[in-house]
Image (cartoon, rainbow, N blue to C red):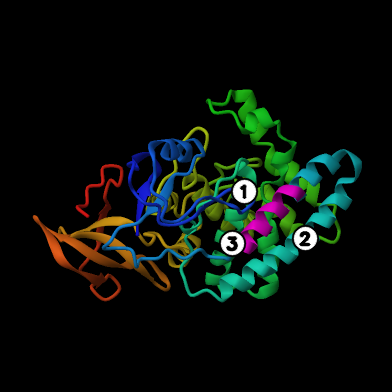
Amino acid sequence: MRLSITASLNPGERLGMNIYNEQGNILLSEGLTLTQKMINRLVALNIPFVYIQDSRTDDIMPKPPISGELRREALQTIEATFLEIKNGVKVNSAFTIEKAALKFTHLVRSIMEELKNSNELLTLLADVYTYDDYIFTHSFNVTLYTLALGMELKLEKKQLEVLGLGAILHDVGKMLVPVDILRKPDKLTEEEFEQIQKHPEYGFHLIKNVYTVSLIVANCAYQHHERLDGSGYPRGVRGDEIHYYGKIIAVADVFDAVTSNRVYRKAMLPHEGLEILYAGAGKKFDKQIIEAFRRAVAIYPNGLTVELNDGRKGIVSSQNEGIGDRPIVRILEEPNHKVVHPYEVDLRTDLHLLIKECLNIQENSLTL
């Protein structure tokens, strides 16, 4: 199957994978023939990409990083617990955070176990879910990216548990920011942006006095928007003043932010998100962490249409473990003609080949 931008879908195309709602129930089923009304609904739900069936690529299967059951449990737990925190702040915030930490630690361990048992590079494009509140899905996605990154960096189990807890709670301070500011589709005013910039400090103060939770977790919330050159917020600390875990979560946070649909911006593809990170390598983000992220995440996910530097075009068919930017590509077109018998090239071994660009899948520029 191949990946397509939702807004570019055509009536009559057949859906390649189930699309789920926030409860984990099937919204649209695999194999369903799409109508314009369905396409409009998917666009309205802010689903940026979907997989479409195609006879020459139907054996190309994107694999979700964790089971649907665990994903549903995770999102429901994050939402319910964050709302408990929001409601419990004025009553007994320390007790509420302590309970949340116990739930989230169990969740982190479950996610770690499934990621450990998977040989696939991480890609969240294999999961097609709708969810109304970006904060909850973002907290979950950042946790997945952070744990995959921590494993690639060879952190020990206990370190990963603390890091994962910090990732889930990194945005908990947004529970104290007015909802109308968080969901505002237009440009924020200076005063509104100042409110947003307070969420790391809010999160730090919510967590730091909970004695059963590591202070490192509080610092993850405090420092995930800090940058190596001191250009971040809320304190503008720099370099080694930023905890290592804060640097890790910063990379995961930015990558998920730019590759997710937001009310004010369309989602980027993973390779575009990585370019954003590399643009800040050594200045804003730790370069070694970005390199580890490149190894852990599928930069060119299965089903993506690409053009190689020799003019051949095709679909990414599978990944090479530990080399997120050199996948296996099924060639469907050679310069000036369609390939009758598609074949695969492995960018891990064919070192002279590079992905020149990801074709504009809005225009369906590959003849299929």
Residue 190 image point, x, y percent? 60, 24
Residue plotted at (55% across, 60% down): 145
Which residue matches tag 3? 68
Query: In the image, is residue 183 above or below residue 150?
Result: above
Q: Please provide percent x and percent y for residue 203.
A: 73, 45
Q: Which structural element holds mark 3? A: helix
Tell me which numbered mark, 2 or 1, is placed earlier along the sequence.
1
Q: Nearer the viewer, mark 2 or mark 3?
A: 3
**N-terminal of the two: label 1 or label 3?**
1
User: Tag 1: residue type?
Assistant: Glu
Q: Nearer the viewer, residue 275 or 338?
A: 338
Q: Which residue is mark 2?
A: 103
The residue positioned 63% from the left and 26% from the top of the image is 192
Residue position for label 1: 22
The answer to which of marks 2 and 3 sits earlier in the sequence is 3
What's under tag 3, amino acid-wise?
A: Gly
- Classify mark 2: helix, strand or loop: helix
